[in-house]
Image: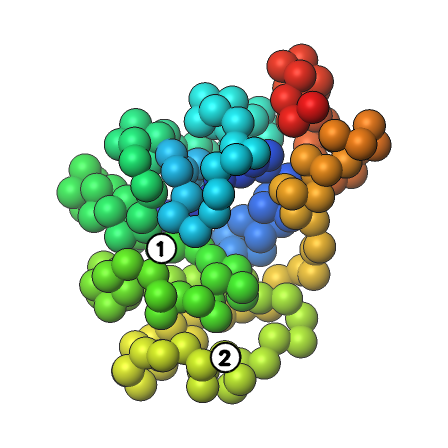
Amino acid sequence: MKIGILGGSFNPIHLGHLIIAQDALEAFGLDRILFMPCASPPHKTAAEMVSAEHRREMVEAAVADHAPFDVSAVEIERGGVSYSIDTVRQLQADDPDPEWNLIIGGDSLAEFHLWRDVEELLQLCAVLTIVRPGFERDQIAASLGLEPDWTKKLLAHVATGHSVKISSSDVRSRIRGGLPIRYLVPDTVSAYIDAHGLYR
């Protein structure tokens, strides 16, 4: 079984996240996508972060009616700063049978060489990148800062997805401003945010 891991703060999860997941599912022939809400992101401030429990429940609400999508609380239960290498090590130790694949976006690809233990991560799993139309592979390759063999391996798994410009920060800003978030997040997530008074 080929399982894709899609991590993030999901603060909140929005349709862009779900579209990336579906693009990866189709482009790379995955059987399942495992959404992985982090405990604490390594490269973001937690100032506007709602609790891990709220973020996990919003992801569960977002994917509940789509069988290939599931949610894992591995990073939340582990606590502390969430690094992908620790997550992949743990998933493989707990269940070595699936083929684990890490899903990232084009923006993350440009900074991937800065991730913790990046070469070990590339040894442990395939890194699948979903990029927007117009992505310049050669420009990114020159700036990756990795050895040529690692760069080649990373760029071997790049697929073009849909161009969707939605961000969690924009969703939060609209909520604070009293603007609608319909068509930006699933209706179930919007209802959860309203019910719990989040981001106000």
Indicate the secondary structure of the residue bearing disc 2: helix
> In the image, 12: left or right of 113?
right
> Residue 32: percent from the left, percent from the top?
43, 43
Q: Residue at x 58, y 52 (%)?
A: 20
> In the rendering, which numbered label is found on residue 101?
1
**Disc 1: CA contacts within 10 A as few (<14), some (14-19) or many (>=20):** many
Q: Viewer-proximal residue, 128 or 146?
A: 146
> In the image, 183: left or right of 19?
right
Q: Residue at x 28, y 59 (%)?
A: 116
The answer to whether residue 57 is above or below residue 11 is: above
Q: Quadrant of residue 168?
A: top right
Q: Quadrant of residue 63?
A: top right
Type of the residue with mark 1: Asn
Dot 2 corresponds to which residue?
Answer: 140
Mark 1 or 2, nearer chain start: 1
Q: Does the rendering let one see residue 34?
A: no
Type of the residue with mark 2: Ile
Verify CB contact (< 8 Å) between mark 1 and mark 2: no
Q: Residue at x 69, y 23 (%)?
A: 200
> Residue 40: percent from the left, percent from the top?
39, 38
